[in-house]
Image (cartoon, coloured by chain):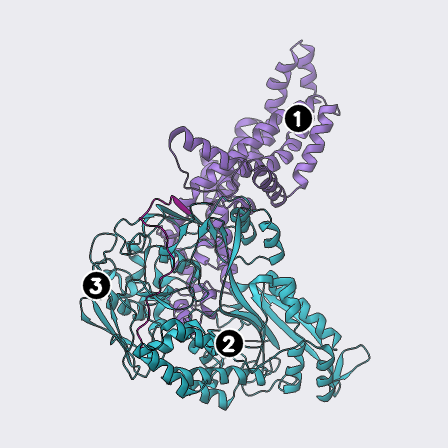
Chain colours: A purple, B cyan
């Protein structure tokens, strides 16, 4: 096992290098720079923007820029953002808690809806409950988050005036009041994201359950006279959850990566909104750092998923 | 206006036979209104009145929180690095300039004790120097005194090339010297009629020498105070999260009486303009939002029975279509749109005139800009003394058709005009932005009726306005036949605005397309007028020269003005923000307050 993990980690190094090279090249080839707003300002002579470009090394050849970046990254220097002239790592760390809180809660919500509903629907396939759950799931994952987000804002903020739709990291008050306010402002984004996730996950759990529930050993368990709950929880769910666990592990990077659309709609200062605003302003060091971290997380959680798989299902041996 | 008559009037004001108000009213009657009238008086030797805007609050603080919503989050807090208005606004909460432009475009002293004039000895008669007297007793947020050394340091800091400051342009080739602790003098190499550029407005904000002296030049990025501003402003720094949030609290030692009104300030960034409008006007979650680039129809709908309203400020921002005078499709010495070529279609003035007849400015205003735009025939739309009254515009497909007929472009079988077997086909580019794409559609439709085939192209803003030399889609390379965007007017003076179309500044490969004359228009009379205006001290003659520049551009159809754009903000009903078309939204933040009865 230890050897397997080590080997996987070693393989990850060249693939991450390859990813970084591709990312950097694509970003460097994209036209544009962060100084667009300067160019039409009559107060700023065009030489200023050109001098800025030069001082940020944007006029150097791509391979040189990539090597500089790689060497710096190897030393733990993530570079600095062109638009805020601030270190990229502190920029990302500043936004991580919010993303973890909102996206993490959304994932938890999704799980706590999807697993019970999926399991129950699978035990009574084609019953009324299953039909309703299925229909709702279909609707849920057919509606994009930007649509449900706006719909929620119109209903709960504009019409009913119950919830705020501008997320703020600066919540007034202390203690219980602070916690309530944090909860209140996160309700809408968490609902939007969580229900969307829950919809597709419900379908996944249900079909995983159905695959297992028909197997002979389940019939055997029933024949032994075990109760329905015991059969479902102990015998069916344990085996059906193996693919579900993999799915969850693979979704973990998204928790760190944030949700671009939802964060933009609710003004959540998370990693997703950092990424999109950096892309729009051609802030290469930030885009590079965020995407690269994301790539690392994907590789890492893939490994975790594989290891978990072996642990949950001893039939699969890791060599 | 007759020169003599004006001089007599200025003398009357000087001698006290006419009051300033009367003078300005006479000027308004003659078409020369507020902003320049005051400068005329200043140069004519009359001290400027300290503008006193109505400010009812009688004590400092007590106004509760002020919540601002900017749909682009500010990313830095050093005014010398502020690439965009959002960053200038953010810096302005904590830092202050010597003076700012008020609602009418007058100078309003902030850190200055008074506005320089000939009478108070601040302005030299030859317009080659300005002496600013600083307000005594002003303290930085950390308690250190604000002095002339700080002002001089800012000039050194910004003009040091290695600092990579964006504010360097506002100093030009001026030098700044300290006279005593509370006096600085700016010396210009040539007579400079518009002297209020350095240390005024957004790029004029002053940072403290004692905290930044060690971080001048190449080390400028390492200054810890880049992210923790210590200024002289009405609010003290509390917290900053780039792109997301800025918080400040009241400065109890602020140097203006009874100001500021609010106890805390919060500027939240991000999102989009429509939902920002919603948060102010519909739900009232926030007090004020800037730059409402939202269709008027949407704003009107939100305002119905809402908790807020939109407010407007007239400046000189102009949205226009520029005509390419060179050929974008022929490459000469590795350069398209080269000065060695002539545009095969648009070099004919009749075709350009026809194009201008095909821009339905009324429709563009009605359908897109609404209250946020005014139709105009002029490129230069303010301040009032510089606005030409000799120009006009109209929309007529018929007349355009006639002009094209005269120019030899006859309708072909497919309805598209042709001449010598060549189709009348134009490429029309702009940046990606809702209102711009709609304007493109309106123009295209009219052109089609007149038999011109227009191909539309839109380029992402960060690419279109980039200074990347390798990029072929920039507005300055202009590899298209016509292009549309906006040039903002950041101060109530046309010098910078008009200078760019001097033939000396044509954008070419040689100057890496840094030349600002992107239409590549060359006109000897225009060059002469700009050159003369830049050194003309007499305000009336100077205004006449810039009007001539504008008229020359109009006669030659270099620019087809689409809309004189007006600044739009959204404010809650009880807020009383001070917004000027000549300044950034927060440039007069110290005067903001809330009306007690909402």
Between the residue at mark 1 and the residue at mark 3, the CA separation in whole angstroms equals: 76 Å
Residue carrying label 2? B380
Residue in front for this viewpoint, B36 or A24: B36
Res B157 → quadrant? bottom left
Residue carrying label 1? A209
Crowdedness of circle 2 by 10 Å Cα count: few (<14), some, many (20+)?
A: many
Q: Position of residue B196 (x, y in %)?
A: 34, 72
Judge whether residue B50 is colored magenta: yes
Residue in front for this viewpoint, B504 or B250: B250
Disc 2 and disc 1 in contact, CB within 8 angstroms: no
Does label 1 lie on the same chain as label 2? no
Does residue B428 appear to the left or right of B589 in the view shown?
right
**Residue at the outermost top position:** A225
**Badge 2 element:** loop
**Image mark 2: chain:** B
Disc 1 and disc 3 in contact, CB within 8 angstroms: no
Where A227 sits versus B391, above or below? Answer: above
**Badge 1 element:** helix
Give the mark nearer the N terminus: 2 vs 3. Answer: 3
In the image, the segment drawn in magenta is B46-66
Front tag of 1 and 3: 3
Q: Is residue B129 visible?
A: yes
Between the residue at mark 2 and the residue at mark 3, the CA separation in whole angstroms equals: 38 Å
**Image mark 1: chain:** A
Between the residue at mark 2 and the residue at mark 1, the CA separation in whole angstroms equals: 72 Å
Q: Residue at x 21, y 63 (%)?
A: B147
Res A43 → quadrant? bottom left
Residue in front for this viewpoint, A41 or B420: A41
Residue carrying label 3? B147
């Amino acid at each position: 096992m230890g050897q397997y993990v080590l080997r996987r980690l070693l393989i990850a190094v060249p693939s991450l290098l390859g990813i970084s090279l591709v990312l950097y090249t694509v970003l460097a080839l994209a036209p544009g720079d962060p100084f667009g707003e300067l160019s039409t300002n009559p107060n700023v002579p065009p030489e200023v923007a050109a001098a800025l470009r030069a001082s940020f090394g944007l006029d150097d050849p791509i391979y040189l820029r990539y090597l500089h970046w790689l060497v710096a990254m190897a030393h733990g220097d993530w570079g600095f953002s062109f638009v805020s002239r601030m270190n990229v790592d502190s920029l990302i760390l500043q936004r991580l808690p919010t993303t973890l809180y909102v996206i993490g809660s959304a994932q938890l919500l999704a799980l706590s809806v999807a697993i019970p509903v999926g399991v129950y629907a699978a035990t009574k396939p084609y019953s009324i409950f299953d039909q309703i759950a299925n229909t709702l799931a279909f609707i849920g994952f057919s509606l994009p988050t930007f649509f449900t987000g706006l719909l929620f804002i119109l209903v709960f903020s504009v019409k009913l005036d119950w919830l705020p739709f501008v997320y703020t990291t600066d919540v007034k008050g202390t203690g219980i009041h602070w916690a309530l306010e944090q909860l209140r402002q996160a309700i809408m984004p968490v609902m939007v994201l969580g229900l969307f996730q829950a919809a597709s996950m419900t379908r996944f759990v249900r079909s995983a359950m159905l695959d297992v529930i028909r197997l002979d050993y389940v019939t055997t368990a029933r024949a032994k006279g075990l109760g329905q709950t015991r059969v479902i929880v102990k015998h069916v769910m344990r085996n059906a959850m193996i693919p579900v666990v993999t799915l969850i592990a693979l979704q973990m990077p998204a928790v760190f990566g944030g949700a671009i659309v939802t964060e933009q709609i609710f003004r959540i200062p998370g990693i997703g909104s950092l990424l999109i605003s950096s892309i729009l302003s051609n802030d290469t060091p930030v885009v590079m750092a965020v995407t690269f971290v994301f790539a690392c997380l994907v590789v890492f959680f893939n490994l975790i998923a594989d290891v978990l798989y072996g642990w949950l299902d001893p039939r699969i041996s890791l060599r | 206006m007759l020169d003599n008559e004006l001089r007599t009037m200025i003398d009357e004001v000087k001698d006290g036979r006419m009051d300033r108000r009367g003078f300005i009213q006479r000027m308004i009657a003659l078409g020369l209104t507020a902003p320049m009238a005051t400068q005329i008086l200043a140069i004519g030797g009359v001290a400027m009145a300290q503008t006193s805007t109505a400010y009812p609050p009688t004590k400092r603080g007590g106004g509760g929180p002020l919540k601002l919503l900017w749909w682009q989050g500010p990313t830095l807090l050093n005014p010398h690095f502020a690439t965009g208005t959002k960053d200038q606004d953010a810096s302005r909460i904590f830092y202050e300039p010597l003076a700012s432009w008020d609602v009418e475009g007058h100078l309003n002293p902030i850190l200055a004790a008074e506005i320089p004039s000939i009478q108070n000895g601040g302005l030299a008669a030859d317009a080659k120097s300005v002496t600013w007297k600083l307000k005594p007793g002003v303290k930085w947020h950390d308690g250190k005194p604000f002095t002339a050394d700080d002002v001089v340091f800012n000039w050194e800091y910004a003009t040091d090339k290695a600092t990579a400051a964006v504010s360097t342009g506002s100093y030009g080739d001026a030098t700044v010297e300290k006279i005593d602790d509370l006096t600085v003098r700016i010396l210009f190499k040539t007579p400079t009629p518009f002297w209020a550029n350095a240390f005024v407005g957004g790029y004029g904000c002053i940072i403290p020498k004692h905290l930044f002296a060690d971080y001048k030049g190449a080390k400028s990025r390492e200054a810890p105070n880049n992210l923790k501003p210590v200024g002289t402003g009405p609010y003290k720094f509390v917290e900053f999260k780039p792109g997301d949030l800025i918080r400040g609290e009241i400065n109890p030692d602020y140097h203006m009486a009874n100001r500021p009104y609010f106890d805390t300030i919060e500027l939240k960034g991000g999102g989009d303009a429509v939902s920002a409008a919603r948060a102010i006007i519909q739900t009232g979650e926030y007090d004020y939002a800037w730059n409402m680039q939202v269709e008027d129809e949407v704003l009107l709908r939100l305002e119905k029975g809402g908790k807020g309203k939109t407010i407007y400020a007239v400046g000189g921002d102009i949205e226009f279509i520029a005509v390419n005078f060179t050929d974008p499709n022929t490459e000469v010495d590795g350069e398209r749109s080269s000065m060695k070529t002539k545009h095969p279609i648009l070099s004919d003035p009749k075709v350009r005139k026809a194009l201008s007849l095909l821009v339905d400015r009324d429709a563009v205003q009605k359908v897109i800009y609404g209250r946020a735009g005014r139709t105009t025939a002029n490129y230069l739309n303010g301040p009032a003394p510089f606005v030409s009254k000799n120009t006009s515009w109209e929309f007529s497909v018929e007349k355009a058709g006639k002009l094209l007929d005269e120019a030899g472009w006859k309708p072909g079988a497919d309805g598209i005009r042709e001449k010598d077997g060549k189709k009348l086909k134009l490429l029309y580019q702009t940046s990606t932005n809702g209102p711009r794409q709609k304007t493109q559609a309106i123009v295209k439709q009219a052109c089609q009726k007149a038999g011109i085939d227009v191909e539309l192209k839109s380029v992402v803003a960060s690419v279109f306005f980039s200074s990347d030399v390798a990029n072929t889609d920039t507005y300055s390379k202009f590899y298209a036949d016509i292009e549309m965007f906006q040039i903002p007017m950041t101060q109530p003076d046309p010098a910078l605005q008009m200078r760019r179309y001097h033939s000396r500044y044509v954008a070419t490969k040689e100057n890496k397309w840094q030349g600002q004359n992107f239409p590549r228009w060359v006109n000897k009379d225009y060059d002469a007028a700009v050159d003369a205006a830049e050194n003309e001290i007499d305000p009336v003659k100077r205004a006449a020269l810039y009007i001539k520049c504008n008229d020359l551009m109009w006669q030659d159809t270099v620019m087809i003005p689409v809309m004189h754009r007006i600044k739009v903000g959204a404010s809650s009903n009880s807020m009383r923000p001070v917004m000027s078309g000549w300044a950034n939204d927060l440039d007069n933040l110290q005067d903001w307050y809330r009306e007690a009865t909402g």
